[in-house]
Amino acid sequence: MSSPLQEAAQRVAKEFDYSDDEVFKAGKHFITQMQEGLLKDGTSMSQIPTYVTAVPNGTEKGVYLAVDLGGTNFRVCSIQLHGDTTFTLTQSKVAIPKELMIAKTAVELFSFLAKQIELFLKEHHGEHFESHLRRRNTVSSPTGYRDEHIFKLGFTFSFPVHQIGINRGTLIRWTKGFDIADAVGKDVCQLLQDAIDALHLPVRVSALVNDTVGTLMSRSYTSPGKTPTVLGAIFGTGTNGAYVEKLSNIKKGLEGAYDAKTGEMVVNTEWGSFDNELTVLPTTVYDKDLDTASVNPGIQMFEKRVSGMFLGELLRLAVVALYKEKLIFTDVAAIEAASPLNTHSGVDSSILSVAAADETADLAALRKEIEVQLAVKQASVEDAKAIKTIAYAIGRRAARLSAVAVGAIVVQSGRLDTTSSSASGEVSEDDIVDVGVDGSLVEFYPAFEEHMRAALRKVAGMGEQGERRVRIGIAKDGSGVGAALIALVAEGMDVDA
Ligand code: ADP
Ligand code: MG
């Protein structure tokens, strides 16, 4: 026997269904928008060329530096690549002083960053650093020391930049509380290099790095075997992907220099804005409300249905609607005004994972989460059951939408067009299509990959054959090892600037 609450929850869950047919159509549309983005600027998906034209296969060796300026902290690390898909990472982290975020000149901030690199080198690479100083003092010409003594550095810079080469990109604007007018329009790699040179450090800024590209690179290095990874995808606070495209398919102008020898280039899709026009994306009343109340209505429409920043809010809106209908929390005296349920974006997506993981009859873990996270005491088992039903539907839809992006890119990459194995039997090493993923949602949401795979089979051009060939693995530390690897491939590039 089903109660009105459970019936209502089932009804809401049904609104979040995303059928096989819709997945099929969306996959086709995704490919259309990818191709549009390769032709011209100003399209739904930006398809930004990254000037990275090679991905590692796990045999790379050497010591590289990586720095990450993302908002709150500045991270410096060195990565030793052992050449056997493994690496050792050493790192330090420092908070950016508030006054430097709003400094008068870019030099003030970048001098601080260079100083941190110097401290890191002294502490962790003292010997190398000292021998560099000795060489500097004995060689009369400042360019006299040999190139192999110079550390190559990958610079992960998480602000909007207009990239014009593998280690060149001008700052479009600051975000996240930074405001240094003097830096806008300048090449951030050059700003860092100048500050490094002022301290005479043996470091060259070799690559400007986006986190999705870092994910792709780190997975390609660490994945088993030598099969290169085709896609790096992030399902965390936001969602985005970078993949390996044929150079000949990138029809819009490339302004910077790059090495054309591989015939490929990594493209940053910015797929969070796939189908902003809502031609194929599913839309419930909750999706509409979420978008209207957001800071950027009408954009990032794919991201608003898929990523961690929004799934908790969809659940909140659905639960609040049930509460207004007096269907849920009927035994609860009143919901506190301060409850996250009454706060825009108050509910963290991690509750979806708790709901999906709790298979007990009395849903003890989920009820505890409802008490702690939603500040609703004495929620009944029935209440929790309804929340579980809805949370499951929201998580499953997100995973199925993720499959649209992953599947369409695998098809577009052309990696399924060749096959070495017979129709039956195991997928051979050569036929594996490797995909690297990162982010709390894909890492912690139970069965995210299973839901994704079920939908992957339905993407146009994939089928069961194609889906079986896709290997999905977590890419650890894209902004560290990924940035180092981009510095490595950048240095190996044969560029006519
Ligand atoms: P970032 O995107 O900043 O690199 P993460 O990959 O950790 O960081 O993603 C953080 C996002 O993931 C947040 O939106 C958070 O709500 C969500 N999240 C964190 N833990 C979980 C979980 N267990 N299940 C689902 N979503 C989660
Ligand atoms: Mg991340």
Image (cartoon, grey):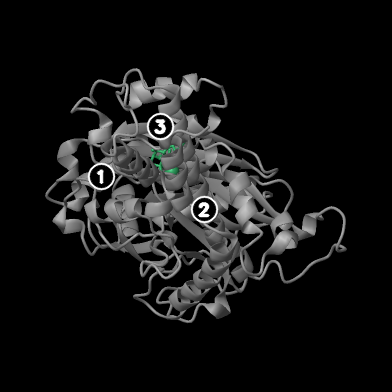
Residue that mark 2 sits on: 233
Mark sitting earlier along the chain (2/3): 3
Residue 165 is at least partly visible in this image: yes
Residue depicted at x 66% and y 69%: 461
Mark 1 or 2, closer to the camera: 2
Describe the element under mark 3 as helix, strand or loop: strand
Mark 1 or 3, closer to the camera: 3
Q: Residues within 10 Å of mark 2 (few under 14, many from 20)?
A: many
Q: CA distance from mark 1 to mark 3?
A: 17 Å
Q: Amino acid at mark 1?
A: Ser
- Using the image as rendered, state which of residue 474 and residue 83 is in the foreground: 474
- Give the percent coordinates (x, y) of residue 18: 51, 56
Residue that mark 3 sits on: 92
Q: CA distance from mark 1 to mark 2?
A: 33 Å
- Give the percent coordinates (x, y) of residue 485: 54, 51
- Using the image as rendered, state which of residue 428 and residue 489 is in the foreground: 428
Describe the element under mark 1 as helix, strand or loop: helix
- Give the percent coordinates (x, y) of residue 388: 47, 34
Mark sitting earlier along the chain (1/2): 1
Residue that mark 1 sits on: 111
Residue depicted at x 55% and y 22%: 361
Q: Amino acid at mark 2?
A: Ala
Mark 2 or 3, closer to the camera: 2
Q: CA distance from mark 2 to mark 3?
A: 26 Å
- Tags 2 and 3 in contact by the CB under 8 Å rule? no
- Using the image as rendered, state which of residue 84 and residue 362 is in the foreground: 362
- Give the percent coordinates (x, y) of residue 246: 59, 73
Residue 497 is at least partly visible in this image: no
